[in-house]
Amino acid sequence: MNSCIIVMRLLLSGPFLFAPAWSYNLDVRHVQNFSFPLAGRHFGYRVLQVGSRVVVGAPSEGNSRGNLYQCQPETGECLQVTLSSNYTSKYLGMTLATDPTSGNVLACDPGLSRTCDQNIYLSGLCYLIHQNLRGPVLQGHPGYQECIKGNVDLVFLFDGSRSLQQDEFEKIVDFMKDVMKKLSNSSYQFAAVQFSTDFKTEFTFLDYIRQKDPDSLLAGVKHMRLLTNTFGAINYVAKEVFRQDLGARPDATKVLIIITDGEATDEHNIDAAKDIIRYIIGIGKNFQTKESQEALHQFASKPAEEFVKILDTFEKLKDLFTELQKKIYVIEGTSKQDLTSFNMELSSSGISADLSEGHGVVGAVGAKDWAGGFLDLKADLESSTFVGNEPLTVESRAGYLGYTVTWLPSQGTMSLLATGAPRYQHVGRVLLFQQPKGGGPWSQIQEIDGSQVGSYFGGELCGVDMDRDGETELLLIAAPLYYGEQRGGRVFIYQKKQLEFQLVSELQGETGYPLGRFGAAIAALTDINGDELTDVAVGAPLEEQGAVYIFNGQQGGLSPRPSQRIEGTQMFSGIQWFGRSIHGVKDLGGDGLADVAVGAEGQVVVLSSRPVVDIITSMSFSPAEIPVHEVECSYSTSSRKKEGVNITVCFQVRSLISTFQGHLVANLTYTLQLDGHRTRSRGLFPGGKHELTRNTAVTSVKSCFMFWFHFPLCIQDLISPINVSLSYSLWEEEGTPRDPRVQGRDIPPILKPSPHSETKEIPFEKNCGEDKTCEADLKLTFSDMGSKILRLTPSASLSVRLTLRNTAEDAYWVQVTLTFPQGLSFRKVEMLKPHSHVPVGCEELPEEIMLQSRVLSCNVSSPIFGADSVVSASGPLLLHTPLLSCQVDIQVMFHTLQKDSWGDFIELEANVSCNNEDLSLLEDNSVTASIPVMYPINILTKDQENSTLYISFTPESPKTQYVKHIYQVRIQPTNYDNVPPLEALVRIPQLHSEGLITHKWSIQMEPPVNCSPINLESPSDVAEPCSFGAEFRCPVDFRQEILVQVIGKVELRGKIEASSTLSLCSSLSISFNSSKHFHLYGSNASMAQVVMKVDLVYEKEMLYLYVLSGIGGLLLLLLIFIALYKVGFFKRNLKEKMEANADASSEIPGEDAGQPETEKEFKDPGCLEPLQMNDACPEDEDGSGGD
């Protein structure tokens, strides 16, 4: 099992994965790698920096020997470290540790194996090597367990009841023979007893001592074929077989293997067998139920689950020996009181190690039935003290405590050690122990448990002294098999607070690598970036071909994001398992910069750090302020000089690593940008560009450069300064690899990861007089040119005009706010002529639910709303004379929204403000306006088709006729609750006092209402068309439809002496309060009129006219007849001509038939008779046919 532990440890540090690399100060372009072809693929499993060399561990593959190698950066070669030993150390190099104080190296092989009575013991072999890798080497065997062969007396108690078939009985006998043969050369003695109703000793221990041939011993066995008295048989064996006079040994462990096919047929206790280890094997179909299986538990040792075996067929007995052998193997060499665990036989001591101030400890994961622990080594490595779980519980078994060990430096009186148990309860655990400095008993002070099953929490540990004051601030605990968020592996950061370590944060790799094993290796590095804080490297050897993360220290802990991620494929395409081991505490190149050694499959890569520098920059401008008259839009372009600003930029390099011994030269790329945050820059370098880029080499000596920029023709924003930003970075030319043998060489530095930019501002001069302080005086009013009334039509809009004046100096950041009611929606804003060029922009502020109003915020002429000036030139002197005021008109347009109630007026409130108006001048900055609201009334009035539109009177007709004028009124409801009282005005015709016609009228309405008549004027003597004589006022309920009937009685009161026509008219209109309401579709829609024509017909005697007309008609007919006769109309033989034409047309024309022979024969087919020269068609008569 411990061999599997070692192999698994090798695999856990194997392949890992991640993504693109981030470059900071570990140089990945110029690296050095070491290899030793004969060392195998595990060369690089462990790496240590010792002095100016790299010690590499290379556990072996197969049955070869593991070795240590020392690699020299100066020569690039590796040599084997010579160790005088008679042992074949297969896994030497699997564990390496160095003493930070003395530099000595502790190297261990945790897989030193040897055979003890056919059992394999695993312990450790460790070497303590001087830092010069020469001189005397101490050798020790931590966890070494002497081979003590344990005696075991084993009795087979087998069932001989009649329920067994003969072939089944024989298979039990064959099984016993097989076990005895396979254990014949061990310290086992055997005896056999058959039981049924009675009990029979087939052979005793003495018989076995005399003759160890199983076939001979069991040759005379006969099947008893009776009952199954199991209780009695066990007592029989305890009292009658385990006897010294029959060969039983007093110091031997007593083992009883019971083989049966059925439940017991007797009842007794088996107290006599309580010191015997009892295994029971139930065979056959009688043990298929849970109750029958549990019945066997009473015969077995505790825990019964480990001492009971159920087989459904007898054939499986032959395959049971391997499992039985494992159970027996546990017993061998143990005491009667401790029947289930090993002590140090399989300790694998040295699977982990750490060394501090000459004090060494090694892990022993296989100790105490793989509960594990660690060994506190004495200085000579010859003796050690085991420290483990206290108390040793069942839960701690197979926890692998000691899989990792690490010292946690402390300035107190106690030494602190952390050790990992990654398989504890499948979630892992880390235990912290302390011991008085100078020696003394160990005590457990803290337990830290993992959270995820199978994560291998505690598989790697690392203590971090952040500020290098001798006190451990952080404990890093890796769980390389942790899975979450598509990330494989996690490192938990515990910070020391008061008396214990508490979880504060986590480190993890990139997503996309669920099997990356992030945390398979952790190393606290010396300060590599010059911030005087310890940095940490974390390996992830299964992220692609392997990756290493660098986490820089920061105040209070580690940065949660890596400053650099290095992939192995960045340096070598065929690399594997890059990051399986890491160590970086030495300067191997002699340049004052730390180097980091990283192990991979079959090779070691040394990454050199680069000097981290800071660039000190400065910028200055001349002139320090931009004259406004050079850039303002009102300035004449014809007389403008092309002036600008000079920029002086200076650089200086400062190293952040005080130990660096080389010469600093930084290849700098820098960019100057003008108004980089704007779409259109207000400054331009020569060539019309707003940025320029330059390259230069800078050193620790200050270097300065000068640049010039000018301005575009017109700049509107004259208040915010022009931003000048300087950004810079370092670039490195492709060159030859760095030579580690040359000290003091020029090494390309790298910038620290801080903002590599600087921004300064060039302000504009303020045109505010001699005191340089602008004081504005703003005044805001509502203009009369806007909407005077708000009519609530479906597409109603409202126009508001504001007049803004500035009667003083320039105003900065002028803002107009307009408060308006909820029913309005902002549409657009515009500046009216002649100031339409002045910019204005509005946006509606977020609406507040509880308020009944909304706010519109407008920026006017941002950022400066000036007091206009007249520019006059007098030689080279430019004068700016402020005008009395600057005035602009702003028009704001609104849409109306649906709203239940508007009230009689809408209130608008406007306010103007700026950044430079005195408080005493604010009284005219606010203004309010009230605009009347008129509500729509939708009324449609029309006359009906069944109204009387015409009547006539004759001498013979009735003297009295009744007429009706019918009107329909439709009132459409609106969306507003404000409905006024309505009144129908019905007008009736005027009565003429001298006329032949008299009439009377009445009004009927549906629904009925009372109408009030009003005489408009007295009857007229002269008839006027459509004149009205009276008016009826009828109140109208607000209904959807109303019918109004004007009923009249028209009488003829005299004799008609001449025909005449007159009109009688009625009308209907709906009236309401027009000060608050209006007709939605105009007033004509609510008016209708009926015009009725009245004819007075005078009738005369007409008989003589009828007689004269008849005589004249007859004379005309006679004249027509005579004329037709004269022209021969009645003599033409029309019938014969028609027949002749029919015969001619029946003939079929030939193929060459064409046009008529002569033109004279071609006539209009309308002529049905043959035409002669003197005949003509009717057309000829009127000149349209013929010649």
Image (cartoon, rainbow, N blue to C red):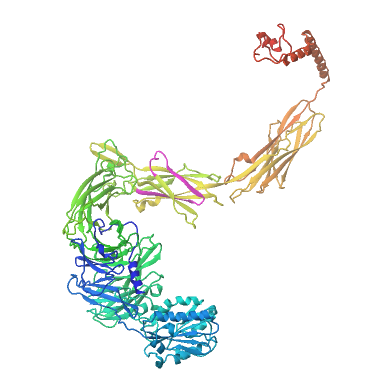
**Magenta-drawn stretch contains 819:** yes
Above/below status of 299 relative to 1124: below
Task: Name the residue nearer the viewer: 375 or 986.
Answer: 375
What segment carries the magenta color? 812-839
Q: Is residue 1055 visible?
A: yes
Q: Dominant secondary structure of the magenta stretch?
A: strand
Above/below status of 665 relative to 241: above
Task: Name the residue nearer the viewer: 624 or 534.
Answer: 534
Above/below status of 130 relative to 74: below
Write the residue at 33% across / 56% down: 20
Q: In the image, is 853 to the left or to the right of 1123?
A: left
**Quadrant of res 955:** top right
**Quadrant of res 1094:** top right
The quadrant in which the N terminus is found is: bottom left
Write the residue at 48% across / 81% down: 172
**Magenta-drawn stretch contains 708:** no
Write the residue at 24% across / 36% down: 874
Q: In the image, is 645 to the left or to the right of 218?
A: left
